[in-house]
Amino acid sequence: MAKIVTMGEIMLRLSTPGNEKFIQADEFDINYGGSEANVAVSLANYGYDTEFVTAIPDNPIGDCAVAAVRKYNVGTKFISRSGDRLGIYYLEPGSAVRPSNIVYDRAGSSIACATADLFDFDAIFADADWFHFTGITPALSDSAAKLTEEALKAAKAHGLTVSVDLNFRKKLWSQEKAREVMTNLMQYVDICIGNEEDAEKVLGFKPEGSDVMSGNLELAGYMNIFSQMADRFGFRYIASSLRESHSASNNGWSACIMDGKTKEFYHSKKYTIAPIVDRVGGGDAFTSGLICSFLDGKDMKTALEFGTAAAALKHTIPGDFNLVTRAEVEKLAGGDSSGRVQR
């Protein structure tokens, strides 16, 4: 069985109950999550050996974050207990025409202050097959960006397949800084994943004719930018989730992928997700599904359908983690979206 390593920040999530606004809330619901941790949990649920690498303060809140992923059989032995604080994010869930809102309180977090000497990358990657990171980690700080590159160099030296979710976060860094840092990191990447905003803001590729706010998706634009990205960076595969935001409660969801060598392009089936329970982690569920399927030896079309179905299911689950099984994803990908009670 293959082993996957992910590296990034896990945070304490404080969300308002129900659909309350921040100003209404007298209490918060507690969860833990973060893009790379979410991917590790999903892959562990699919039966793969996973290892999550991060830095967490050596205090009871740090213990809770470790326990949150360990509960789902994610490896934690390479987590550095260092730094002074765990990052926090506050979530105000949206509804109907009111969008969700996120406020970050993560400056100076343990992983943002971490350096490469805290991690034995030779040991971390010694028996691993795949390394996954996102554009969030290098956005945290200059030291986190340097840490990410050191991890990538070590992963490639050990012969791992490397995937990235571009994940542009405008509240963390500017478009210009993102392009400068992430363009350099693409030299280590085999599989590139991101939505239309990520491709434009992070790498400078914009799919012409698409407007996700109006629900208009022009697939020819994606084919064009995927081909350009493959030519420039040599990606093995390029994939994008396609979210049509009709409202905070009602989204269309599909995805597309291209083989970087043959330029074969494929668009998945589309799901209508309404009402949405929790959209946080949807992209991570998509990424996890792709990785799982590729490690299973599936072709890119099957992989895309599995990843798209996994992400659709994540929208029905509270919290950051996607806790569905392979069987549940395969059932939906196979066409059963009835939602009938299982007895």
Image (cartoon, rainbow, N blue to C red):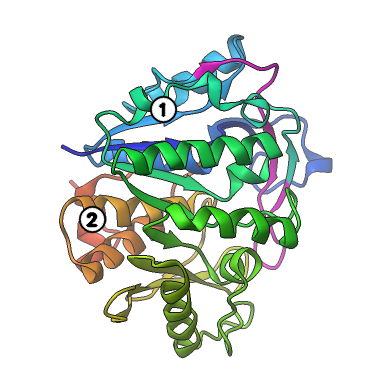
Q: Is residue 129 left or right of residue 343?
A: right
Report the mark closest to the observer, 1 or 2.
1
The location of residue 70, given as percent across then percent down, is 38, 22
What residue is rendered at 68% in x and 32% in y?
Answer: 88
Q: Residues within 10 Å of mark 2 (few under 14, many from 20)?
A: many
86 part of magenta stretch = yes
Asked if the residue at tag 2 contacts the one at tag 1, i.e. Cβ–Cβ closer than 8 Å, the answer is no
The location of residue 162, given as percent across then percent down, is 37, 49
Q: Is residue 79 visible?
A: yes
Farthest residue to the front: give it: 157
Q: Residues within 10 Å of mark 1 (few under 14, many from 20)?
A: some
The residue singled out by tag 2 in the image is 293
Q: Quadrant of residue 289?
A: bottom left
Q: Which residues are magenta?
A: 80-102
Badge 1 amino acid: Phe
Q: Is residue 333 left or right of residue 313?
A: left
Farthest residue to the right: give it: 23
Q: Quadrant of the N terminus?
A: top left
Q: Is residue 296 left or right of residue 89?
A: left
Residue at disc 2, secondary structure: helix
